[in-house]
Image (spheres, grey):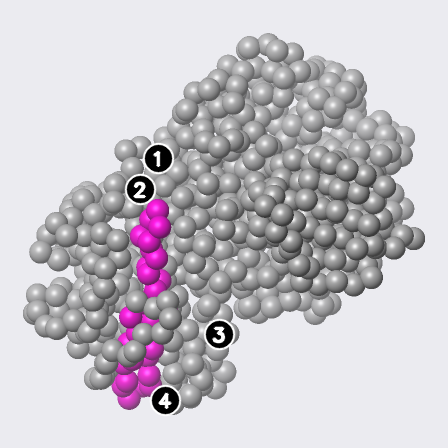
């Protein structure tokens, strides 16, 4: 998230649009519509070229939204409201017709949705449209408003603005454009919503993207008599501004979850992750492009027939294979074979796992390591150790002291890359934001908590605390890499459980807020993105333009831990958003596999030296783009093969004696066999959300009549039924009873 902006420090230049708006407010005039929203009052007024919605809290200031910019004389009238609407307006000009619709909701928080549809009278492109949001100070003067902007849109991620108005004390506001609704506009004009929500105080909000001058109006124009949505805005309000960063983060998560409930959510698809896992396991074991031998041992190529083996890749694949083996009931031989080569990564002099094998090529700096690469392999070693693997425990504990020395040397503030032999910094900060790997402390804390669980040595608990406490004050800038941020949230939640100190629960929201800020909270239909899903994906790095499979499924794993450790004190919207992330990941992640995409969508050649793309191999692409660029420009990541094993082992559940697997796209909180042909499961997701429960026929078995009822004995009818599968939409929170003949 962008750094806090204290507007008292420097006044930004103002535009004539702001001054014209201020004059409009000072000139009086009649309102076209008025309605209340909880303690807020909403008034809709016109100026010479615009329509404004003015939201006030009596005696506490307010804000104004430019809902339509017509740039020409127009006539505006109020229309009869339809069901669920607070107001409906029509504005007619020489350019065409604007239809503006207002929706209001008030439960725990006040929220307002404003949808603007435009029907051109002629073929046209829109001129420059000024930003649409002004905070209001004393006497409705935007130049008198003082406050802070905490977050604005990054790249093609969620088109949000999170800010507070301190003088007058209006409170906290979340602004969110539903970019999914604007797809038709982007396609018609050849534009993308790259960083379109932001601005300089007090001129904030959405800057409508317009075609470049050399685009050619023959190709990019709105068509006459074809309605297009120009804006779909959701505003969420809180009366009290937060006292510190942790409460600000919690309110952000709460308000984002509140806005989420107003979105028109895209559907999810059923994916056969069990079949994908079996195919991936075969390709991993048999394809010569997947593995290579060194020192007589088998190692995984990071990319298809590309790049040198490294310890993060090896451990990620081994850990996922281990999960898959537990689900299957017996390990795959490949897991044991890959484990045999792990000791060659261990440096007995430094007493740590190295990134590369000793014989790595000269084009690599064998001593260079990205900070997160030091700890993520230990995380997976810790998982194996906690599952009783003594060899993994020996490597984990043998490396832990070096990991602590590195953390203390850098004072728990890691650079991007350093030399493992002497801690010399090779690259201190990332060019995008001038910061190091700010979320490595989170994954380090998780590793220390694993060591604490293995040994009961309080020293490791103290190290976890030190790492998390060093991140206090980073506000919403904590994200460097999405999965590391997710593990930081999980570490905070685990620390809260162990220590009962509220500050760690609160700090978990800072990690979640930063993660969700980088979320692609829209279903892009721009360019090649029409062929894959983007909703609720997260771009992998704080400055990356793409979504990546490894970060996707590793974040899924971290949130499984976070939710398992949480309890009734967890912010409900946090529980809902993480559960929804996991639900959409199970559908969306299928699109990373090249055989699931049309050939013309794939990049012609991945970047050097990342091998090639082979559509016949069940390994995912690294990169998909919300702006519809060709997929797989970075490469086909063999180290992402673990996704299928993780998704299959979490979403599909074996039921002894039943002729089916039970699929659920929400993580199950409880499973109890309550009869020979009866099963009770508990879901603990969003109270207003829906999960997909599916009964999937086992091979060589026949489905029998299956019923699903709620705890109140209300039967849930299937929405799809076939010889192979029965599908149910079920409440995402509560107990369900499944019975079969």
Q: CA distance from mark 1 to mark 3?
A: 37 Å
Is 63 left, or right, of 486 in this rendering?
A: left
Is 453 left, or right, of 331 in this rendering?
A: left
Q: Is residue 221 above or below residue 423?
A: below
Single out the mark in the foreground, 3 or 2. Answer: 3
User: What secondary structure is the stretch in magenta mostly built from?
Assistant: strand
Q: Is residue 576 above or below residue 365?
A: below
Q: What range is drawn magenta here?
A: 87-115
**Tag on residue 184?**
3
Task: Say whether disc 2 or disc 1 marks the residue closer to the N-terminus.
Answer: 2
Q: Can residue 310 be seen in the rendering of this structure? A: no
Residue at 75 percent of width and 47 percent of height? 739
Task: Say whether disc 3 or disc 2 marks the residue closer to the N-terminus.
Answer: 2
Which residue is identified by label 1? 247
Single out the mark in the foreground, 2 or 1. Answer: 1
Single out the mark in the foreground, 1 or 3. Answer: 1
Which residue is identified by label 2? 4
Q: CA distance from mark 2 to mark 1?
A: 15 Å
Q: How packed is label 1: few (under 14 Cα within 10 Å), some, or many (20 or more)?
A: some
Q: CA distance from mark 1 to mark 4?
A: 48 Å
Q: CA distance from mark 2 to mark 4?
A: 43 Å
Q: Is residue 95 above or below residue 342?
A: below
Q: Position of residue 70 (x, y in %)?
A: 27, 78
**Tag on residue 121?**
4
């Amino acid at each position: 998230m962008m750094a806090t902006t204290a507007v008292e420090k420097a006044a930004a230049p103002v535009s004539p649009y702001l001054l014209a708006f201020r004059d409009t407010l000072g000139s009086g005039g009649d309102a076209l519509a008025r309605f209340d929203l909880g303690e807020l009052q909403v008034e809709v007024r016109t100026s010479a070229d615009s329509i404004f919605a003015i939201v006030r809290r009596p005696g506490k200031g307010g804000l104004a939204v430019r809902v339509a910019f017509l740039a020409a004389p127009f006539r505006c009238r109020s229309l009869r409201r339809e069901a669920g609407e607070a107001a409906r307006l029509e504005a007619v000009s020489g350019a065409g017709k604007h239809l503006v619709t207002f929706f209001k909701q008030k439960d725990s928080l006040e929220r307002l949705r404003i949808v603007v549809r435009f029907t051109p009278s002629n073929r046209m492109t829109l001129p420059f449209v000024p930003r649409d949001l002004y905070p209001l100070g004393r006497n409705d003067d935007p130049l008198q408003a003082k406050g802070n902007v905490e977050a604005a849109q990054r790249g093609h991620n969620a088109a949000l603005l999170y800010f507070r108005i301190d003088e007058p004390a209006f409170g906290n506001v979340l602004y969110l454009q539903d970019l999914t609704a604007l797809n038709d506009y982007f396609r018609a004009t050849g534009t993308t919503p790259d960083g379109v929500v932001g601005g300089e105080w007090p001129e904030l909000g959405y800057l409508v993207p317009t075609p470049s001058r050399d685009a050619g109006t023959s190709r990019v124009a709105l068509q006459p008599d074809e309605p297009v949505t120009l804006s779909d805005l959701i505003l969420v309000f809180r009366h009290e501004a937060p006292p510190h960063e942790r409460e600000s983060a919690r309110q952000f998560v709460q308000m984002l979850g509140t806005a989420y409930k107003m979105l028109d959510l895209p559907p999810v698809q059923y994916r056969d992750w069990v079949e994908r896992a079996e195919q991936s396991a075969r390709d991993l074991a048999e394809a010569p492009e997947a593995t290579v031998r060194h020192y007589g041992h088998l190692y995984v190529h990071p990319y298809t027939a590309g790049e040198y083996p490294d310890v993060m890749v090896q451990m990620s694949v081994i850990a996922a294979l281990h999960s898959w083996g537990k689900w299957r009931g017996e390990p795959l031989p490949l897991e044991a074979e890959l484990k045999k080569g792990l000791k060659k990564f261990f440096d007995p002099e430094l007493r740590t796992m190295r990134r590369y094998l000793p014989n790595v090529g000269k084009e690599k700096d064998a001593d260079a390591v990205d900070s997160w690469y030091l700890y993520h392999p230990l995380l997976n070693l810790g998982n194996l150790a906690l599952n009783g693997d003594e060899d993994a425990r020996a490597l984990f504990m043998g490396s832990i002291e070096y990991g602590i020395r590195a953390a203390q040397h850098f004072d728990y503030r890691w650079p991007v890359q350093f030399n493992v032999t002497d801690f010399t910094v090779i690259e201190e900060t990332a060019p995008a934001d001038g910061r190091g790997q700010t979320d490595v402390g989170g994954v380090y804390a998780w590793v220390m908590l694993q060591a604490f669980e293995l040994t009961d040595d309080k020293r490791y608990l103290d190290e976890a605390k030190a790492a998390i406490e060093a991140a206090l004050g980073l506000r919403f800038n904590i994200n460097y890499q999405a999965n590391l941020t997710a593990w930081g949230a999980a570490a905070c939640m685990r620390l809260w459980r162990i220590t009962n100190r509220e500050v760690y629960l609160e700090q978990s929201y800072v990690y979640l807020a930063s993660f969700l800020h980088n979320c692609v909270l829209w279903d892009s239909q721009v360019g090649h993105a029409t062929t894959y899903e983007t909703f609720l994906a997260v771009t992998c790095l704080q400055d990356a333009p793409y979504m990546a499979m490894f970060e996707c499924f590793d974040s899924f794993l971290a949130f499984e831990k976070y939710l398992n450790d949480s309890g009734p004190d967890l912010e409900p919207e946090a529980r809902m958003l993480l559960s929804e992330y996991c639900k959409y990941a199970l559908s969306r992640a299928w699109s990373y596999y090249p055989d699931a995409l049309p050939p013309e969508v794939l990049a012609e050649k991945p970047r050097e030296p990342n091998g090639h793309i082979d559509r016949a191999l069940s390994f995912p692409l690294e990169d998909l783009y919300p702006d519809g660029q060709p997929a797989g420009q970075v490469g086909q990541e063999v180290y992402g093969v673990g996704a299928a094993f993780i998704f299959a082992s979490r979403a599909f559940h074996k039921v002894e004696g039943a002729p089916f697997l039970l699929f659920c796209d929400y993580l199950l909180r409880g499973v109890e066999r309550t009869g020979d042909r009866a099963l009770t499961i508990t879901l603990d997701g969003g109270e207003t959300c829906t999960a997909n429960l599916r009964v999937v026929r086992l091979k060589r078995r026949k489905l029998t009549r299956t019923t699903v009822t709620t705890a109140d004995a209300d039967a849930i009818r299937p929405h799809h039924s076939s010889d192979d599968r029965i599908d149910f939409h079920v409440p995402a929170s509560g107990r369900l009873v499944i019975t079969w003949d």
